[in-house]
Amino acid sequence: MKRTVGKRGTVFMGGEFLDDHTVVGRALAVIEAVVACGPNATLADLARLTGIPKPTALRIANDLVHRRLLRRTPNGYALGPELSRLGETASLQRDFDRYLPVLEELHAAHGGVAWLTAGRELAKVQPVGMVCDDGLEGIARAGWPAPGSAAMLINTAGGHLALAHQSDLLERVARNGMAPSTPHSLREVSQLYASVGRARQEGFAVESEQSARGWTCAAALLPARADKRAVVGVTIPVGRANARELIRSVLRALEAIVADIAPPGK
């Protein structure tokens, strides 16, 4: 196998990045070439390392920039923020996938969507585990407010848990005003402070139709793990269970996960 030395002394094994003439293969080859070159990988670098013609390499690289998998730099291309997000999500899924049985038990109690979110910032935790009723996959993946958005922070149980542990974020959200999503959403900052205060004191939160009509949700905050924060919760159609039943089920799930994180006597 031929060995060639690339820019900055990087050693490439012949064929590692070669063009396989598939859409996915070419995109991955361009990304791998940027990884090998480091920031400011030029179009000439990408074409040379992958064997993809320059016009095609340019089109692929610019499409990856549009998808935030790469980003433009003053002199070329570098890895984009979406790759960082995907890498973090993959790491979190590896850390938390063993709690799928807990989510399955939570889902068995009420149906709907049992979920676990995690991330470095509590306000921007993302789904890392989910069990849901048949037909709810689309809603479960894309039917709720985006992590970190005003609608998520103000109108969801998970958002109130985030605000309860980030007083500076709560102040900033309150200054920007309320963002009601439904007729049942909180309308006054005083209501938000009261709900967040309860979440801070109790370690869990519950809301009904504040984020989406016809849905109610309960969530609880897991103990911090190194630089990771996580929330476990369940979202179900209104009327399937009352708030007290939901909270009891979520707290049982919380206790099961905590027992695994810190076994008795340790």
Image (cartoon, rainbow, N blue to C red):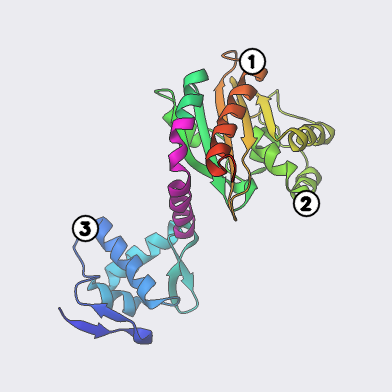
Q: Is residue 13 above or below residue 85?
A: below
Let me know if residue 124 is in the magenta part. no
Would residue 156 be seen by someone viewing this image from the given angle? no
Residue picked out by circle 3: 22
Which numbered disc covers residue 242? Answer: 1
Badge 2 element? helix
Query: Where is mark 2, residue-wise?
Result: 168
Left or right for 1, reference 43 = left
- Sequence-earlier tag: 3 or 1: 3
Where is residue 266? Give x, y as percent. 59, 46
Q: Residue at x 75, y 29 (%)?
A: 186
Camera-side residue of 179 and 198: 198
Tell me how far mark 2 sits from mark 1, CA to CA.
Answer: 32 Å
The image quarter in which residue 12 lies: bottom left
Residue 34 placement (x, y as % from top left):
37, 72
Question: Which amino acid type corresponds to the residue marked 2 in the rendered image?
Answer: Asp
Q: What's the residue type where badge 1 is placed? A: Asn
The range drawn in magenta is: 83-102
Upstream in sequence: badge 2 or badge 1: 2
- Do the CB atoms of the residues marked 2 and 3 lie less than 8 Å apart? no
Circle 1 packing at 10 Å, graded few (<14), some (14-19), many (20+), is few
